[in-house]
Image (spheres, helix red, strand yellow):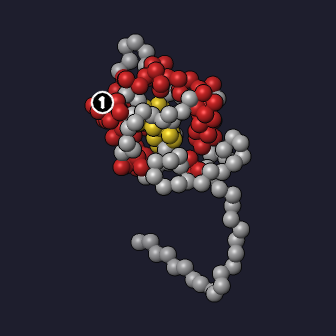
Amino acid sequence: MFVSYASEDADWARGLASRLGRRGLHVVFDEWDVLPGDVGVHHTEAAIDSVACALVVISPASRTSPWAREEYAAWVTAGARRNLRLIPVLIGDAPLPPLTASRVWRDFRHVDGPGYEEKVDELVAAVRGETAPDGSRRSAAPGLQDNIAAAQPLPPRPLTPPDQPAVVLCYAA
């Protein structure tokens, strides 16, 4: 998992990356993984091509930082190009960008203490494709509310026969 953030949000992003790592996720974080002499852009490009998941921290700083905006665009493109899970993480009072709004996001605005740790646990569960840590399922609601439930796997639905016989025809050139 790669954590993308604006430099002004480094302290917050570092704290999240540390917690994710302590919960067993392999986290690529530039401060830890880019060594002296490395080219940061090459490191980011390699991560874009190799990681399965990216967290993009959306904040007031990331909305105005030229580098954060470039990185965000690269992650959105990678998400559309290959099977990359891109999870926006909201902090501060930044509005959700339109392309990000189509993704399941995690809202860390105005959260601290036990509520923060609970959201980290839910995020880890979603990345792993597990149900919420407490076994509950929260329903996704419209607007800027948490919509993590959409990332949780649903129990399989029972197969039911149709009321009327049907035929489905698919054609591919």
Q: Position of residue 13 (x, y in %)?
A: 47, 26
Query: Is residue 60 placed above or below 98 in the rendered structure?
Result: above
Q: Residue furthest front?
A: 110
Q: Mark yes or no: residue 47 visible.
A: no
Q: Residues within 10 Å of mark 1 (few under 14, many from 20)?
A: some
Q: Residue furthest bottom?
A: 164
Q: Which residue is mark 1?
A: 65
Q: Is residue 145 left or right of residue 59?
A: right
Screen quadrant of the C terminus: bottom left
Q: Position of residue 134 (x, y in %)?
A: 71, 42
- Please state which of residues 57 and 31 is positioned toward the viewer in this rendering: 57
What residue is rendered at 43% in x and 22% in y? 10
What residue is rendered at 45% in x and 52% in y? 143
Q: Position of residue 74 (x, y in %)?
A: 35, 39
Q: Position of residue 56 (x, y in %)?
A: 43, 36
Q: How many marks?
A: 1
What residue is rendered at 45% in x and 38% in y? 90
Query: Is residue 4 placed above or below 138 in the rendered structure?
Result: above
Q: Is residue 113 left or right of residue 135?
A: left
What residue is rendered at 61% in x and 40% in y? 122
Instruction: Give the image quarter of residue 126.
Output: top right
What amino acid is at disc 1?
Ser
